[in-house]
Each structure stands twice: as structure tokens, then as C-alpha cells.
Amino acid sequence: MSTQLSKLPDELQLATENHVKYIQSLDTRKDEYDYWLTEHLRLNGVYWGLVALHLLSHPDALPRAETIDFVLSCQHESGGFSAAPGHDAHMLYTVSAVQILAMVDAFDELETRGKGKAKVGEFIASLQNRETGTFAGDEWGEEDTRFLYGAFNALSLLGLLHLVDVDRAVAHVVACGNFDGGYGVSPGAESHAGQTFTCVAALAIAGRLDGGSGGLVDRDRLGRWLSERQIPGGGLNGRPEKAEDVCYSWWVLSSLQIIGRAHWIDRDALIAFILRCQDPEKGGIADRPGDMVDVWHTCFGMAGLSLLDYPGTEPVDPVYCMPRSTIERVLGK
């Protein structure tokens, strides 16, 4: 940590204990209207909270048995997972389920009490368009590079990446690249930091960052576009002329980390921005200073601090947005 950062005032120190308490409290608010309004995000919320807790060095702050029970209660006969019992299965919830089970070391439970890894892999593989390489989120067919990345993420954790056509998927990712080095949601779409992460991380999982003559990714050109996302206040935005948002501390910085250009931004300024977005008294991190906190921004704010080597945080894997220790255990890296 730099001398400048070590001199931050007390209110700009990480409120670890309060962040842990905030995350623990999220499932105790069942008498609040907002709790039921967000039921469609419940499984994702468990993933976001669990990642943040791991990075805060409190991996056991949520009850493991109850977490596993809830995840398995969301699984469908198809092998896919829904956000909560009674909802439809979707790629994004399925990815969160796999990531949660990986973090709590419960793949064995998936085999003995759930539908098993093979069934999950079958569900994910069924969502690939074998002609274009793209992936849909569910049976209704919306396609997005988020789903492609999610498929690669979950299948690689399960050891089942061979179930899909990786080459066609990679070709689609390359087609989403733009002249500025960034990537859009589809070929010809505007570059966006979130979509850029999904594309770069998918290529990393496939081992294709440097394939072909000169490589599939122009690291310097992409690095310039990503580093230009930092604005004078220290935060990062998702595309030109937009406001900063804590979540881009992850989407932008992880992409820079993957391509080896994380040193191209002002790290101390970004750390200070993230810390200004936290509620030091009640816990949680917001999108911007003074706004309401939520578990989404708490997760990605913590992931950003971890990438920035903030003292007391556990290392995060820049490709999977999971604790590095989990990835090392599951993938043997």
C-alpha cells in the first residue's frame, strides 16, 4: 500500500466487520417489501454476498448447510437452476449456483442430492447455437456474451467445457471486437466495459487470448481503452461520457489484470473512490458516494479492492470473480 493511501482518514478505511454484518442481515428482512421485489435475484445475491465474505476473510459467515440446501432447492429437472424455488431456470442463475457450490466445496452434494454435474452441463450446452457459437440465457432465446462467458465459467469449473463448441464461441467473441479495442454485446455493438470483461475472460478460459498471428487480443489497444475509463474522481465508467460506478472497479480492472495492464490506472485514486462509496456505519457499498448500498456493488467493490491488493482482502481470481483459493482447489491451478 502506498504512503498516500496509508494516510487516508479513518472514514476511508474498510469497515470490514460492518460489511460482514450487512451481508449476514440480507436474508433476515423477509418482512420488508424490497425483499420480495428482489426474489428474482435471490440466487445471484447469495453468490455476490458469498464472494464478498470470502474476500473480507470471513468465508464461513453464512451457514454452509443452509446455503447448499437453498441452492439445490432451485434446481430443475433439466439440470438448470432458477433464482428461487418456483422460478424458471436460466443460464445466469445456473452459473451462480455452480460458483456457490464451488466456493463451499459442495460438488459432491450436487451429485448425491442434486441432479449431478452431467445434468447441469447438459442444460448449459443445450443453450448454445451450434451454428453461430452464441449462447441463450434460457429457452426463450435471448443471446448475449454474458451467457457465453457464464457457460465457459461454469462448464470449466465442472470439467465439462468439452460439451460445447469452443471454437465457434471464440469466433463469435472475436467478431464482437471493435476498432477501439473493446467489445460489444454483439458484432457491431458499442464497446462496453462489462461486455469487454465477458469476452476477454471467456477467451482466457478457452486459452485463446494469444491465439493466431499477433494474438486474438490487442493488449495495448484494449488496455488504452480500458484505462481511459478512469475519470478525475478516481472511479471508472463503463463507456465514454458516462458516470463512474463502483461495479466497473471489477469489470474494467479485471480485464486489465487479465491482459497484464492493471498498472495503467491510478490505483490509489480508485481505492479511495471505492472506500468513499461504502457505508462505514451500517456496512455495504453503493454505486457512488452517498447512494444506497446493495449486495451487487458490495461484491464488485470488494472484488476491485482485492485486485488492488488492499490490505486485509483475500486474493480474487480476475477471470472467475471467485476467491483465488477456490479456483486453485477446483482447477488445480
Image (spheres, rainbow, N blue to C red):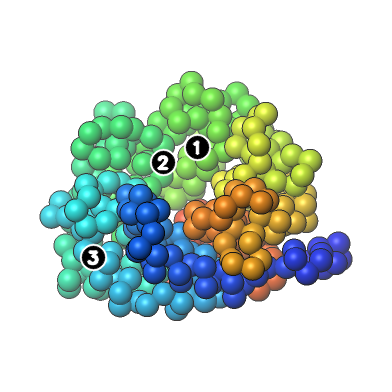
Point out residue 280 in the picture as x, y percentages from the top left corner.
66, 66
**Left or right: 170, with 249 as reference point:** left
* Amino acid type, label 3: Leu
Point out residue 6 in the picture as x, y percentages from the top left corner.
82, 68
* Amino acid type, label 2: Arg
In front here: 171 or 310?
310
Q: How far, Cα to Cα, is label 2 from label 3?
A: 23 Å
Question: Which numbered disc flags the more N-terminal residue, 2 or 1?
Answer: 2
Between circles 3 and 1, the one closer to the viewer is 3
Q: Residue at image x 38%, y 34%?
A: 144
Between circles 2 and 3, the one closer to the viewer is 3
In front here: 212 or 326?
326
Query: Mark 3 highlights which residue?
Result: 72
Q: Quadrant of residue 104?
A: bottom left
Tag 3: Cα neighbours inside 10 Å, few (<14), some, or many (≥20)? Answer: many
Question: Which quadrant, please, contains the N terminus?
Answer: bottom right
Question: Which numbered disc flags the more N-terminal residue, 3 or 1?
Answer: 3
Query: Mark 1 highlights which residue?
Result: 195
The answer to whether the residues at label 3 and label 1 have Cβ atoms under 8 Å apart is no
Q: Residue at image x 17%, y 71%?
A: 113
Query: Mark 2 highlights which residue?
Result: 146
**Left or right: 45, with 12 as reference point:** left
Question: Which numbered disc flags the more N-terminal residue, 2 or 3?
Answer: 3
**Left or right: 94, with 313 as reference point:** left
The answer to whether the residues at label 2 and label 1 have Cβ atoms under 8 Å apart is yes
* Helix, strand or loop for disc 2: helix
